Image (cartoon, rainbow, N blue to C red):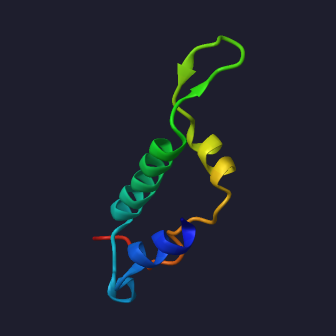
Amino acid sequence: MRTINLPVLLNGCGAWLLPLREEHKVKFLKNKVLRRIYGPWRDEATGEWRKLHNEELHDLFASPSICPVVTFRKMR
């Protein structure tokens, strides 16, 4: 999965100069895809189903962020 997704997402990014708000969109998309892949989790304490928090997603996926790979700059 990681082998395929990263090249697809980074296709042509050498020419990208993105504002910081775009960095947030990339992170949002990554978290949305990871939530879709891992699905809801059952809370052991309450027994209820819930969404995973961002930190839990990052712990499960254990992959470095894509954002340092792409050049981001602050829009004026």
Identified at 45% across, 43% down, the residue is 36
Identified at 59% across, 29% down, the residue is 41
Identified at 52% across, 69% down, the residue is 66
Query: Horizontal placement of 55 versus 26: left or right?
Result: right
Identified at 50% across, 46% down, the residue is 37
- 35 vs 73, nearest the viewer: 35
- 14 vs 75, nearest the viewer: 14
In the rendered image, the vertical position of residue 22 relative to residue 32, given as above or below: below
Q: Position of residue 39 (x, y in %)?
A: 51, 36
- Residue 73 seen in this snapshot: no
- 42 vs 62, nearest the viewer: 42
In the rendered image, the vertical position of residue 32 relative to residue 43, given as above or below: below
Q: Residue furthest right?
A: 45
In the rendered image, the vertical position of residue 40 relative to residue 1, given as above or below: above
Q: Residue furthest top?
A: 46
Query: Horizontal placement of 24 versus 42: left or right?
Result: left
Q: Quadrant of the N terminus?
A: bottom right
Q: Position of residue 75 (x, y in %)?
A: 30, 70
Q: Quadrant of the C terminus?
A: bottom left
- Residue 22 seen in this snapshot: yes
Query: Horizontal placement of 40 versus 17: left or right?
Result: right
In the rendered image, the vertical position of residue 52 relative to residue 8, given as above or below: above
Query: Horizontal placement of 21 versus 44: left or right?
Result: left
